[in-house]
Image (tube, rainbow, N blue to C red):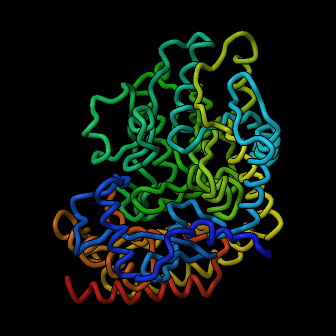
Amino acid sequence: MGDQMTIHEMITDGITVTNPEHESHTFSERARRNLWLQMSRMGSYSETNEIPIMVRGEGTHVYDANGKRYFDGLSGLFTNSLGHGRTDIGQAAAKQIGELGFFPLWTYAHPRAIELAEKIASLTPGDLNRVFFTTGGGEAVESAWKLARQYHRLRGDTDRYKVISRDVAYHGTTMGALTITSLDAYRKQFEPLVPGAVKVPTTNFYHAPEHADNYEAFGLWSANQIEEAILREGPETVAAVFLEPVQNAGGCFVPPPGYWQKVREICDRYGVILVSDEVICGFGRLGEWFGSLKYDYVPDIITVAKGITAGYAPLGAMIVSDRLYEPFMDEDAFMHGFTWAGHPVSCAIALKTIEIIETEGVLENVRANEAYFHDSLNSLREIPIVGDVRGTGYFWGIELVKDQSTKETWQGEDAERLLRGYVSPEMFRRGLICRSDDRGDPVVQLAPPLISTREDIDFMVNTLRDVFTGATKLV
């Protein structure tokens, strides 16, 4: 590149680590003083328990301020799907900055938003052809609920305001999205929330309350819980159902055969809008562009973010069917928007991301390795604390149990000691970044970059084998 600086050089210019331990300590001290981390217990960080400082990334790995290398087993946060340090994405961003750095989509348009909307519409199932941009996933979910409510009002159904979602589900943290979210730890500090939230069971077959011996029957039972909720609340009051293709919180709950088709049938029967929340599952995480394509259903709205730009810029979107868009074609505006939605640079990066996924066979890579990933993780079942292994594509959860035969779970102080006391720090010490999650039953989640190889899978599984084996000696 001649005299041009690389992306890594530009990022690290002025913060060269000459004394790694001192530099890491200095960064951590500065972070404690001014930086408020997301979803973090800030009181747990001290001079002896420093904040991890990540200073650069390369491919499927990131490096901290001490120079230590980690495999990014969670793709940042289900986001860095193409890995780190891609100069071609940086070049696409630089080109757009030189052409048009910013202009809003409020009554105006710009070429990159138009091109990206066209491209997304070409990838979606059915008639989902209308793309409303946001800057992230929570905003996309918030937008979808507001759209559903206004859509019903425009059609004269003024009493439809309620929303149905599943237990343990996470859909964002803005007040509307938080209402759809079902995690008490996230909700209780901010109650009362927006009225109208209704919860139904998950598709967690490992702890099935009904039909525990028949996967398909359990799936139909789970779907029918949505119909029962609609009837209990009154169909004339229910605006929308929000579901992820594979539910993240709780640990990668995969839909049983026929589940989505039954849900679609129920929503059609009662005039309820079906929202497929694909903030995590969209853009290749499951080996297809969208989870709705993988499981063969056509929702009314798809919400996306994260992988749409492979993490290189903030962007989200609500993708809407022509049918839902139709009432807005007259004089009625959707009175909703965000300044940064559809930012030209983010759209340029998203277009480049989609191009890379297409030209480099990224979806094919996920599909080619899915069975290998599944089989490798299932080999961990021989470890006494491993209960269930579930997931698909490059999206997996391993549930940890006290007793495999009874499926007794870890709770309270025991779960804290297992996950935060040993499993999480030990994985990190061994150079693996993934998620130890106790939103529901204790699980460890893996969602590596979609470019990950079988060698990467082996590293993740072997690391987990060592960590889980070590954990059995402590419990």
Q: Is residue 407 above or below residue 200?
A: below
Along the viewing direction, whichever of 468 and 209 lies nearer the viewer: 468
Residue 406 in view of the camera: no
| Residue drawn at the location 29% of the way across and 45% of the way down | 184
Query: Where is residue 326 drawn, in percent x and y?
Result: 74, 21
| Residue drawn at the location 55% of the way across and 70% of the way down | 12
| Residue drawn at the location 45% of the way across and 43% of the way down | 172
For residue 53, side relative to residue 415 (left or right) = right
Query: Where is residue 105 drawn, in percent x and y?
Result: 70, 29
Along the viewing direction, whichever of 78 and 388 lies nearer the viewer: 78
Image quadrant holding the C terminus, namely: bottom left
Residue 392 in view of the camera: yes
Q: Residue furthest left?
A: 413
For residue 163, side relative to residue 327 (left or right) = left
For residue 294, side relative to residue 80 (left or right) = right
Along the viewing direction, whichever of 368 and 131 lies nearer the viewer: 131
Query: Where is residue 77 drawn, in percent x and y?
Result: 50, 61
Quadrant of res 277: top right
Count of marks placed on residues: 0
Image quadrant holding the N terminus, namely: bottom right
| Residue drawn at the location 36% of the way across and 25% of the way down | 195
Q: Is residue 364 above or below residue 243?
A: below
Q: Is residue 316 above or below residue 152?
A: below
Query: Where is residue 249 drawn, in percent x and y?
Result: 42, 56
